[in-house]
Amino acid sequence: MSRPAKIIAAVLAVVVLGVGAVYGYILFVKEDAPDALDSGDLDDALGGSDTTAGAEPDATTGTDAATDAATDAATATTTATGGDTGDVSGAWAITQDSTLGYRVDEVLGGVDTEGAGRTNQVTGTLTIEGTSATAAEFTVDMASVTSDSSRRDGQFRDRIMSTDEFPTSTFVLTAPIEFGSIPAEGEQITAGATGDLTLRGVTQSVTFDVTAQIEGGRIGVLGSIPIVFDEWSIPEPSNGFATVKDEGLLEFVLVFERA
């Protein structure tokens, strides 16, 4: 075999091995990204309180006494707020039953896939007056956002979101959210929200839909915000391994209890 032919063969071998490695990573290493957050996740989050974690069963009845106590407390809260049509006015605080994260479309070695990172490290408050949310402020610990890939997480924290310099992202409601009514227990209602979203030190006004639900004396809010990276001065996420589209999605399920 001539020298040029050997060089071509070597290059082809490297390409084949590279493509094989990518497919191997996708098939055997990379986990599927979690599904996009939806109304089912909102319902699950409101029913998934860890209040009773670690509780010991009642020695006499064999039932979980802490579970009974939590049920009684939820019933009392619902009764205190008037049941289905109760007054939810006042201040509410985010709990760690919340989930917030990003979702992006990726291409790995010519194969379409998806990346998603999530965290429950969200703090903030929501103020309700009658049937309107009149104020809200949320802060996210960006370094706590993780995906199925440590390599992606390193890129996210260092080059893309620069979490050492910009450790948090924030959202501040700038106009009341008019729900029009207080939903019945377990009912989901949708309204528009407008506020200032700050990512990587850049603030932009955003408008998006939110879905709210009341369950067991707690309030849940589901929503998503399209993010065009250039608009927040977020560096191009693509690298030699993955090609990422120029926009992604910020998605969340926020769970609140009385502050």
Image: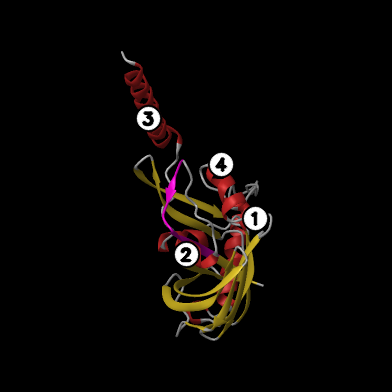
Q: Marks 3 and 1: CB-CB under 8 Å? A: no
Image quarter of the C terminus? bottom right
Q: What is the three-letter code of the residue carrying label 4? A: Ser
Tell me the distance, in whole angstroms, between the alpha carbons under discs 2 and 1: 18 Å
Using the image as rendered, state which of residue 127 and residue 173 is in the foreground: 173
Q: Residue at x 38, y 26 (%)?
A: 11
Identify the image quadrant of residue 191: bottom left
Circle 3 — which element?
helix
Give x and y (percent) for residue 45.
Answer: 51, 60
Asked if residue 72 lies left or right of residue 184, the reply is: right
Circle 1 — which element?
loop
Q: Earlier in the sequence, mark 4 or mark 2?
A: 4
Identify the image quadrant of residue 74: bottom right
Identify the image quadrant of residue 186: bottom left
Neighbours of disc 4 within 10 Å: few (<14), some (14-19), many (20+): few
* Circle on res. 150: 4
From the viewer's perspective, is residue 120 above or below residue 91? Answer: above
Give x and y (percent) for residue 244.
Answer: 43, 51
From the viewer's perspective, is residue 205 above or below residue 140? Answer: below
Neighbours of disc 3 within 10 Å: few (<14), some (14-19), many (20+): few
Q: Is residue 192 visible?
A: yes
Neighbours of disc 2 within 10 Å: few (<14), some (14-19), many (20+): some
* Circle on res. 227: 2
Is residue 128 a member of the stretch shown in magenta?
no
Asked if residue 90 lies left or right of residue 37, the reply is: right
Q: What is the three-letter code of the residue carrying label 3? A: Val
Q: Is residue 94 visible?
A: no
Image quarter of the N terminus? top left
The stretch of residues the image draws in magenta is 241-254
Residue occupied by mark 3:
15
**Comparing labels 4 and 1, the label whose residue is closer to the camera:** 1
Circle 4 — which element?
helix
